[in-house]
Amino acid sequence: MSLDPTSLGGLVEAEEIGPATPEGEAIEGRSPWLLGWQRLRRDRVAMVSLVIVVLIILMAIFAPLATWLTGHPPNEQYRQIGLTPDGQPKGPSSEFWFGTDDLGRDIFVRIAYGARVSLLVGVVATGIAVAIGVVVGLAAGFFGGLVDTVLARLVDVILCVPFLLVAIALVSITGPSLSITIFVIGFFSWASVARIVRGQVLSLREREFVEAARSLGASDPRIMFVDILPNVLAPVIVYTTLLIPVVIVVEATLAFLGLGLPPPTADWGGMLSDAQNFYTTAWWYLLCPGAALLITTLAFNLFGDGVRDAFDPRSDQLLK
Amino acid sequence: MSKSDEPGTPGSVTPTPSDGPGADPLLRVEHVSKAFPVSSAKLFRRSHEFVHAVDDVSLEVHSGETLGLVGETGCGKSTLARCIARLYDLTSGSVTFDGKDISTLTRREMRPLRREIQMIFQDPYGSLNPRRRVGSIIGDPFVIHGIDSRSERKKLVQDLMELVGLNPEHYNRFPADFSGGQRQRIGTARALALRPRLVVCDEPVSALDVSVQAQVINLLKDLQEEFGLTYIFISHDLSVIRHVSDRIAVMYLGRIVEVAPTAELFGNTRHPYTRALLSALPVADPDEADRRESIVLVGDIPSPTNPPSGCRFHTRCPKARPDCAVTDPMLEPAYDDGSDHLTACLHPLAAGEDMTLDRPQIEDSEILAAPAPGSELAKEIRDEPGPH
């Protein structure tokens, strides 16, 4: 990004804080989260990205609205009106806004429905990865010693596994389905989260407030989740927003390789795969799902960058 | 009369005798040592080097008094404090609190005692969790020790905030909204929440602005009077220690070298190290400052990984004699001192002795050079507890 929202945000903030709040006012302290959100709000790129992300989410939720608007169900094949006389896909028109595919289905409606798959996999698989990663990272960093050694090796092993090959092998054994896709992606994405969390916890557990909690007689789980976790949440949230687009692309990749959801379910990766044979004659067939994927991942990434600058400026090098 | 000619057995220190006749001390520290391995243990490799942060320290603290613990950075003050608060496990020795040996208690067994022994930490920025509201930080002790009613807790926390001079309405603010002195008040409120009997103050004012130091010290003194607290007050600042302490223990390289009531320590200094520390104390009167002897110690504090043989101070001591490199002095009354003034020195300072005239009678080379194998000295040095 050519814009530097951190320095800009910092300057603006300094000015706003300058005239100190009069005594007695703002008794409620501004939480680090609130301050982060205020910084994020001033980041124009991030806010535009956020709007796009919200629109995509709305599109996924209200995908049936696309059917209602056009009158075309996602899997309906319009062999009469949706294909040219020689059986080729039809270009964009008032009837088919983004054109049709090789079976005469409405690409616009299918992209709306495809967003459901992408977002569902993106969010759920990322959620699984982050949950595993946070717990493993917390345990490894907090307990240290043998626990750390074992978990750190496990992380190394997971990072070494050739993910795509294993994914292909797994899916070909179990057959493609939504749950196996989510499971495979989630299971192979937690290792980097664990690494980030572990690194943070290693330095946090030496801080005096952890010692203070110990001297009060706090239990290990309490120290881990009440004292340490809130302090690693910022990098975790940043990483989560940056992991979602990665997962969406991975899901599209799997679908492209024929390991996504079984047809006729609409899926961006699957549409791209089908479009390969028609790109000379039907540019819209390839372009529309490709653009949808690009816009989605770009929006998530730019939003993630903004979140990082707002909530956790120091982790810049950590994540790149 | 002089005991300086009697070599003590290395490593043995007599426990500080009780200064209140008949009264059992609230806290008794006996022969406590704490060693840290130098490199962390790997899966298949164990480290063999140790930092002897605290080495065979014995102390007594009586109910209601303030024991000052003073010494250079790295002399083991904070480690000793954390051993007493059982944040660290002891390598050896025992800590007895109120007649109960707490040195081998498990964390679970230790929990009820956490109410009695609390700590105030040095760094007002590091000791408060930046992500939590002040109310919940001060309320932590109540949650951990089972006072769960939210409204009751809020009342208690706000009372505490008032007690330490904070505005109770700032309950919902974050640590970042407070200044260093206010943060130290927050840490104090947290430590006092459960009405402890012993409070270990680990350099509570060292990180503060001088003008704020006095406020916090006065607060601590007021609280001591109000609640009958017993303090172990750690600092490297002698003027602070002098102001707050009833008795002072001077530490050097993991050992206690001199313990005495405050006035006695300042008026009748026995240990050359204590004298050197006191001479570094600034005086407000410039004429007085010019007249005063100033003892500048040469060299750095030796590595606690491999402490010097004999008296640990002999490598820097202006009064060092050859036997200092060989014999480890015991902590005992020097000359005609009372039983409450103990010094660990083979050649303690006599009253009025001018230490600036002293020159060490041993050369560093004599200490460092390996003595001929088989010689008495070599044997003595080899027998020293070291990193083996």
Image: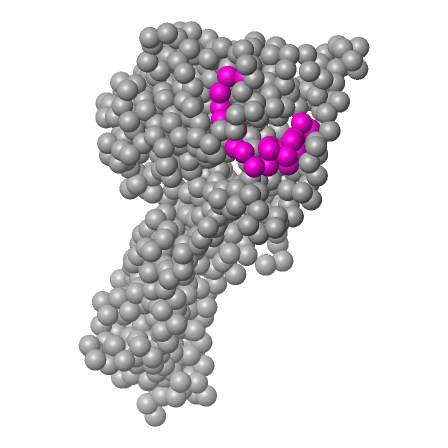
Instruction: Say above or below: A318 vs B134.
Output: below
Q: Residue at x 37, y 60 (%)?
A: B43
- Residue A196 percent location from the top left of the image: 43, 55
Q: Nearer the viewer, residue B157 or B172?
A: B157
- Report the residue that reaches farthest toward the bottom: A86
Colour theme: one colour
Q: Nearer the viewer, residue B146 or A107?
A: B146
Q: Residue at x 72, y 12 (%)?
A: B284
Q: Is residue B181 left or right of residue B189?
A: right
Q: Residue at x 48, y 34 (%)?
A: B10
Q: Is residue A300 left or right of residue A8?
A: left
- Residue A90 percent location from the top left of the image: 38, 82
Instruction: Say above or below: B26 vs A137.
Output: above
- Residue A253 percent location from the top left of the image: 37, 75
Instruction: Say above or below: B84 vs B340.
Output: below
Can residue A21 be seen by looking at this rendering? no
What is the total number of numbered labels drawn onto the structure image? 0
| Residue B327 lies in quadrant | top right
Residue B329: say if magenta: yes
Instruction: Point out the image quarter for the N terminus of chain B.
Output: top right
Q: Nearer the viewer, residue B149 or B341?
A: B341
Instruction: Say above or below: B178 vs B289.
Output: below
Residue B192: say if magenta: no
Q: Residue at x 57, y 40 (%)?
A: B308
Can residue B257 be seen by looking at this rendering? yes
- Residue A320 percent location from the top left of the image: 52, 61
The residue segment tinted magenta is B313-334
| Most common secondary structure along the magenta stretch | loop
